[in-house]
């Protein structure tokens, strides 16, 4: 995969929570909520400043674990893997720095 987000966009792979089944009830995939935690796969170069002469650095970097809203961004599928692409403004917080 070779995707480079533009401007202040971030490519995120949502991290699925560990599923525990109680009482033998299995919840179908269509009824599950989207995970709110993700790992940053790629980041854009940052948005342009108001004067258009410089870029504003991104606060997140590749490998960061972040919190995102359930309905934030646009879901895409690349090589059979689901990702979400969103703007840096849609990131709620950074959980821990990556590698």
Image (cartoon, grey):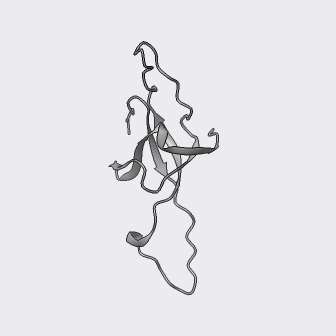
Quadrant of the image containing the C terminus: top right
In the rendered image, the vertical position of residue 32 relative to residue 65, given as above or below:
below
Residue 78 falls left or right of residue 87? left
Rendered residue at 50%/84% (across/down): 25
Looking at the image, which is closer to me, 3 or 51? 51
Place of residue 75 in the rendered image (x, y in percent of width and height, measured from the top left): 36, 51
Rendered residue at 51%/42% (across/down): 40
The residue sitting at the front extreme is: 50
Place of residue 38 in the rendered image (x, y in percent of width and height, measured from the top left): 52, 50
Rendered residue at 41%/49% (across/down): 83
In the rendered image, the vertical position of residue 50 relative to residue 61, given as above or below:
above
Quadrant of the image containing the N terminus: top left
Place of residue 10 in the rendered image (x, y in percent of width and height, measured from the top left): 45, 38
The residue sitting at the top extreme is: 53
Place of residue 19 in the rendered image (x, y in percent of width and height, measured from the top left): 55, 70
Looking at the image, which is closer to me, 52 or 34? 52
In the rendered image, the vertical position of residue 90 relative to residue 51, given as above or below:
below
């Amino acid at each position: 995969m070779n995707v480079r987000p533009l401007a202040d966009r971030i490519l995120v792979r949502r991290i699925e929570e560990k599923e525990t089944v109680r009482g033998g009830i299995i919840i179908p995939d269509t009824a599950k909520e989207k995970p709110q935690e993700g790992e940053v796969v790629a980041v854009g170069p940052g948005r342009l400043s108001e004067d258009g002469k410089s870029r504003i650095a991104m606060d997140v970097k590749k490998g960061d674990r972040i919190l995102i809203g359930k309905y934030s961004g646009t879901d895409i599928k690349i090589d059979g893997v689901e990702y979400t692409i969103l703007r840096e403004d849609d990131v709620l917080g950074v959980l821990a720095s990556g590698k």
